[in-house]
Amino acid sequence: MQISFHKYQGTGNDFVMIDDRQRTFPEDNSEVIGFLCDRKMGVGADGVILIQEHPEHDFRMIYYNPDGSKSLCGNGSRCAIAFAKALGMIGDKTVFETTDGVHDAFIQGEIVHFHLHDVNTVEHQGNDFFIDTGSPHHVQLVEDVAAVEIVSEGSAIRYDEKYSPGGTNVNFLQQQESQISVRTYERGVEGETLSCGTGVTACALAASFLNYESPVSVETKGGQLSVSFEKKGEQHFENIYLAGPAKKVFEGIVEVPVQNEIPS
Ligand SMILES: N[C@@H](CCC[C@H](N)C(=O)O)C(=O)O
């Protein structure tokens, strides 16, 4: 089977994007998704995104982690918006549906602004927070984010009984003079990604408890993001926007081995 794809990245969080308006992609096939994400055998990416027609909105976006699971993806949404614009499906404003419902967004030059749903609950204990920004995120404050052993420390929290059975993404946040620095262990990838949009958003909301004001600038290994929000009361956030670049890298056609020949 041959699959045409476009490769996009948003601050280094990279995705295989599929124009699936003809509905030919083998949806929910975790072996094909895993193959496309494989950096040695396939194209290589942190996730796969399908763009489909939607009866009421501009488009539907389906995001898959490399293990085939689904969740909201902030950077993936920003890339999907840029891709939908390149396909001529939208202009500079859009309303589309993804894993957690309907979102709006707009594009200003190279920057895609993605509107996340309101957040009503923040769990906060000492240096640790838990915030669901459409995907679940544990946030831990650290002195030196560069020194964190992301895979061992992140997976210990990701698989903690507290978050069973679904698990959580895990973000490490270092406070700096005028911004925060974040590194993320992503569930479904089971490793560090260069940036995680919903994670960065959770960290910016957590930073509001440390006296950072909106918009919060966030440094990730893959580049700079900005998160704006209105804090209404102790735990309630509205008008949450994640903003940053989303870029096409290349496009191509990949030969996907037949089902029982996909390397595991
Ligand atoms: N990279 C994403 C988050 C993708 C989903 C996550 N791995 C999960 O399973 O919750 C982002 O930019 O938000």
Image (spheres, rainbow, N blue to C red):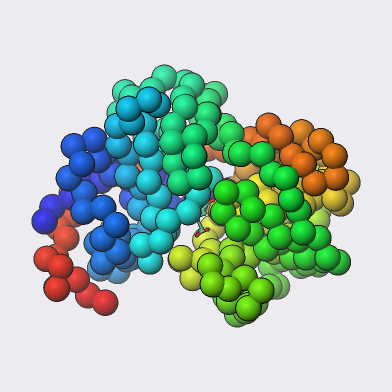
Q: As rendered, which of 145 and 164 lies closer to the eye?
A: 164
Image-based side of 264 in relation to 177, left or right: left
Q: Give the left or right position of residue 98, taking residue 226 as reference.
A: left
Question: Against 213, is 157 above or below?
Answer: below
How many numbered marks, from 0 up?
0
Q: Percent x, y for residue 126?
A: 86, 66
Residue 22 image position (x, y, % from top left): 18, 37
- Identified at 41% across, 19% down, the residue is 91
Residue 30 versus residue 86: which sits nearer the camera? 30
Give the quarter of the figure containing the C terminus.
Answer: bottom left
Instruction: Answer with left or right where residue 37 lies relative to residue 123.
Output: left
Q: Quadrant of residue 161?
A: bottom right
Q: How far across and how far down the image is residue 241, in percent?
A: 63, 35
Give the residue at x 76% y 53%: 122
Where residue 135 sits, quadrant-wise, is bottom right
Residue 10 appears anywhere in the view = no
Give 192 or 89, whichever is nearer the viewer. Answer: 89
Horizontally, residue 59 falls left or right of residue 94, namely: left
